[in-house]
Amino acid sequence: MKKFYLTTPIYYVNGAPHIGHAYTSIAADVLARWQRLDGCEVFFLTGTDEHGQKVEKAAAEAGIDPQRFTDQVAADFRAMAAAMGVSNDDFIRTTEERHRRACVALWERLAANGAIYLGHYEGWYAVRDEAFYGEDELVKKPDGTRLAPTGAPVEWVREPSYFFRLSAWQEKLLAFYEQNPDFIAPAARRNEVLSFVRGGLDDLSVSRTSFRWGIPVPNDPAHVMYVWLDALTNYITAAGFPDEAAARWPFWPADLHIVGKEIVRFHAVYWPAMLMAAGIAPPKRIYSHGWWTVEGEKMSKSLGNVIDPRALVAEFGLDPLRYFLLREVPFGNDGDFSRRALITRLNGELANDLGNLAQRTLSLIARNCDGLRPEIGVRIAADQALLAASGALADVLRERLQRLAFHEALEEVWKTVRAANAYIDHQAPWALRKTDSARMAVVLRVLLDALRGIATVLQPFMPDSMARMLDQLGVPEGERNLAALAEDLPAGASLPVPSGIFPRFVEAAG
RNA sequence: GGCGGCGUAGCUCAGCGGUAGAGCAGGGGAAUCAUAAUCCCUUGGUCGGUGGUUCAAAUCCGCCCGCCGCUACCA
């Protein structure tokens, strides 16, 4: 069976999960579910990034030790994933022992290959950004203190540090990008990475001595590993590294890392360089998605407009939220989240277009066909046209999802939904009931089959709702994958009493 | 400063060399099976500006204007 390994980033635990985390995880989840539906053996990984000075400080401010602090926040992220219907196969935490072992093993391989050396680093360091800045980048305030371009306070730090010989990898990385043109997408992000690498690479500081909350460097416990080296390693930890006999090691290299655009460089430059330096295959693809604004404004704690995705689920339901996030904006672009836009999608597309189509079809069958699935009968051109559209969906979506074009995938499904609404109006089975009940039955069967195709391919996007729809369509549990669409369902099966899948959302008065 | 992207109907966007498209919103009509849902027709754009290439340019090239991303440097 074909294997497919995909990951979300591991989320940094210095804050609570918000809509951005939910978005990344939901998008990855749709792909994971799609690949399973398409017959792949999937390993879908998410988790939390728990080391680093910011976490150490946040824990200190909360008055608890870092491990307890991260236990709490990690539990919150795990709960968020569950609340979003995320079907991850594993949840990795960088504070786990398996991860420490993997990081140590990777470090030792890099050291053995001469890719790491001890030097020292000094400069202006911003704890908040986990980054050093050049003197010229700083903004001097009247009181003499300096701030990073991000506004974070900086302090002069001089410390010994291990370095990764990133500078040795410029040409090899460029050759790698050349040979793997799809490695970074979308194209705009690829251009940025190419431009960055062409500009020359400095060696990368990969250890710190200024704090303790991290994985100790082998044979030099005064140092802890740089959080990004630590964090990126999670993707091979979960595959069993360094045990290449592990059950999941055959999943490596990962088919896809989904990342936010702010961490493209780490994944597209540092990560493949480190892996190649250690003699490990780099991942196959990196895809960078965009960011959400909220009601037209940047999401920020100070504006107080950070959205808890669980509150949205409570108000609108999980599947409408999942649908909206992937339908509203091309993956890779930035987008704006607004209540009004969500309600428009929910009412217009889910309730009116699809939900109502299923409801009118199923209630006609319940009332006029004794609730039994009709015979296929003799089909005319209009029947075949609709079924050709719904029958093509699996192949069409496979191509769209290969490109992570979720919004195009959903638009393609909705073209068929609209065609089905036009079909039912033109065929008017409620009129045929009086004049030609045999033809009416054929029409209703066509609609039933078209809805089956639609609901089947929509399962990854809206698992619960589509499970209910397939229940109502009488599709057995074992016949809901893409391959099963090749077989017609037998006539005469008794269908359950239909009930609405997507109720219209009505804004509370006042 | 360098590299890159974007600017098309009221809104969100597709089209990227051959007589301007979709969804939503607006207007008119039909139907009444259905979650007052649906269907049909329709108003609406000098495709940011300007110059050029071409038989033909949203579509290619130059310049300008306005946004945005990555990156570098001076003080």
Image (tube, coloured by chain):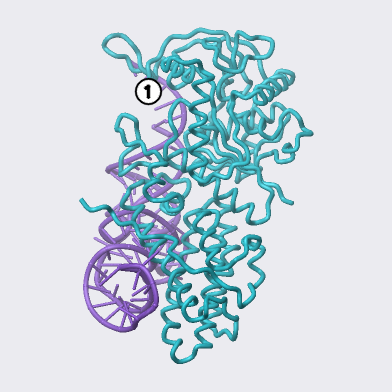
Chain colours: A cyan, B purple
Q: Is residue A248 visible?
A: yes
Residue A191 image position (x, y, % from top left): 51, 40
Which residue shows up at 55% across the image and 77% down it?
Answer: A445
- Give the total of numbered labels: 1
Position of residue A399 in the picture relative to residue A499 (left or right): right
Identify the residue shown where x is 44% and y is 54%.
A327
In this rendering, is residue A288 above or below A167? below
Query: Residue B66's spot in the image, x, y percent?
Result: 28, 42
Residue A347 spot, x, y in % from top left: 36, 60
Left or right of A145, for residue A439: right
Q: Quadrant of residue A134?
A: top left
Check disc 1 and report its element: helix, strand or loop.
loop
Please identify the quarter of the rendering in which residue B60 is found: bottom left
Nearest to the observer: residue A479 or residue A98: A479
Dot 1 amino acid type: Pro
Chain of the residue displaying label 1? A
The answer to whether one can see residue A198 in this image is: no
Q: Which residue is mark 1?
A: A149
Q: Position of residue A481 (x, y in %)?
A: 63, 60
For residue A322, above or below residue A489: above
Against A489, is A54 above or below? Answer: above
| Residue at point 54%, 44% (across, down) | A86
Q: Name the residue: 47% across, 45% down.
A: A332
